[in-house]
Image (spheres, rainbow, N blue to C red):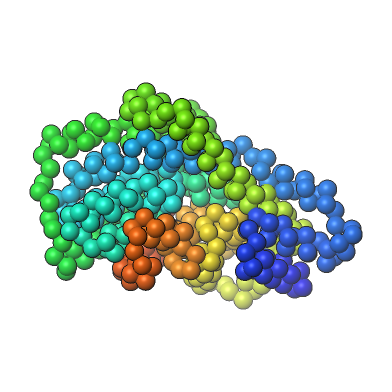
Amino acid sequence: MTIFLVLFGVLLILLFIGVPVGFAMIGASICVLALNRGFEMVPYEMVAQRTLYGVNSFTLLAIPAFLLIGRLMNESGISERVFNIARTAVGHLRGGLGHVNVLSSFIFAGMSGSAVADAGGLGPVQIKAMERDGYDRGFSAAVTASSATIGPIIPPSIPAVIYGALANVSIAAVFLGSIIPGILMGVMMMALVAFISHRRGYPVAARASISDFGRALVAGFLPVLTPLIIICGILSGIFTPTEASAVAVVYCALIAALVYRTLTFASFWRICRETAVDTAALLVIIAGSALYAWVLARYQVTSQIVDFLSANIESVVVILIVLNLFILLIGCFIDSVPALFLLTPIVVPLIQTYGIDPIHFGVVMILNLMIGLITPPVGTVLFTVQKVADIRFGVLIREILPFYIPLFGTLILITFIPWLVTFVPSVLLR
């Protein structure tokens, strides 16, 4: 019990005083080792080995690749092409540009795999177009922020890669298991947009002609192929998810540089430099979480948690409710990627004792953490959209409240109806 309190207590204290997550995990782990051995006897060579071991993974190479894809898409003007496809497809419905916002986020999700990339790349285009057509800025920002959470659900997905690597499950299965939940999120958000737009009397645009839709589709067709290349390549066995991410990077760079000619060598070099900085920050978290997970296993902390819960909770339904509430709480205070590294080594052994499919619960956990991205006080997407829209934080929170309904609705459905997640992988990965 003492080890448990030190391991989690020190971590929370370090996070509270502003220590970066990766270093906070390393610090908490060293404190536990010192508690048992004394600081002078801490095996610092083993600490170094375990942190290095955490980043020595071929699978995790997909993370910088997907980060690079997102930046390439934003830099090359692909965001506007995606938006135009969505506009000509659904712009004529009640609350048309709200639907366009959701649909374009859905399409862009299959390219970047990141909620922040979606909000930062499509956000300015979406909010400016909606405001120009008579929509309130607060509503436009709320739709943009909530639809950005689809990004890490629809494959490819950076959180799915991380979860698959940490839980030792098929990344392709997590990708495929996310498809139906992503569609549910999009459909339920569009229904809410239609309801609010009808209540507020937002404008209805003229229906785009078939020729307009054709021109928009031709202009944005090549980028839209990106997720198909990734998924089809993985399912056919031509390449692994990591290799697929590298192929997608080359493909996106080629169409941006040679077809659209919006990517110069100078901009490409800048994008690579920015991606390297983002990747380095993630690698520190990965290294710290590897040491933290080793300490959890070394002192059987995970086993103690599993034994305690299994002794007091017998119902699978109850444990799912408890875990959902716990992960939602963590997601409100810790960003999604660090939270995955922190929670996965603890949660996966627990759900397996209850017979819960780790693929199913992986998608549930990722959606939980995506809701955290638009939940105060540490909502990364909230602050990104607030900056893009240039509105008061209170206004954004008030407008985004109704959009928790489709998100929590989807979460409840996939939590208690597992086949919504497991059906597609079971069919395509036989």
Q: Position of residue 79 (x, y in %)?
A: 33, 42
* Residue drawn where x is 36% and y is 55% of the image: 388
Q: Is residue 170 left or right of residue 72?
A: right
Residue at the image position 37 percent from the left and 63 percent from the top = 407
Res. 211 image quadrant: top left
Q: Is residue 32 above or below residue 253?
A: below
* Residue 182 drawn at (x, y percent): 36, 52
Tally the numbered discs.
Answer: 0
Residue 2 lies, in percent from the top left, at: 77, 73
Is 327 placed above or below 388 here? Answer: below
Q: Nearer the viewer, residue 312 or 118?
A: 118
Q: Residue furthest bottom?
A: 312
Q: For residue 61, what is the image quadrant?
A: top right
Pinpoint residue 282: horizontal percent, then vertical percent. 59, 48
**Residue farthest right in this picture:** 40
Q: Is residue 123 left or right of residue 196?
A: right
Question: Relative to 244, does residue 204 appear above or below in the rendering?
Answer: below
Q: Is residue 317 visible?
A: no
Residue ID at (81%, 61%)? 33
Which residue is located at x 12 percent, y 51 percent? Answer: 205
Check the image and report above or below for 270 versus 412. above
Q: Nearer the viewer, residue 365 or 206?
A: 206
Q: Residue furthest top?
A: 258
Report whether residue 34 is seen: yes
Residue 219's quadrant in the figure?
top left
Position of the N terminus by quadrant? bottom right
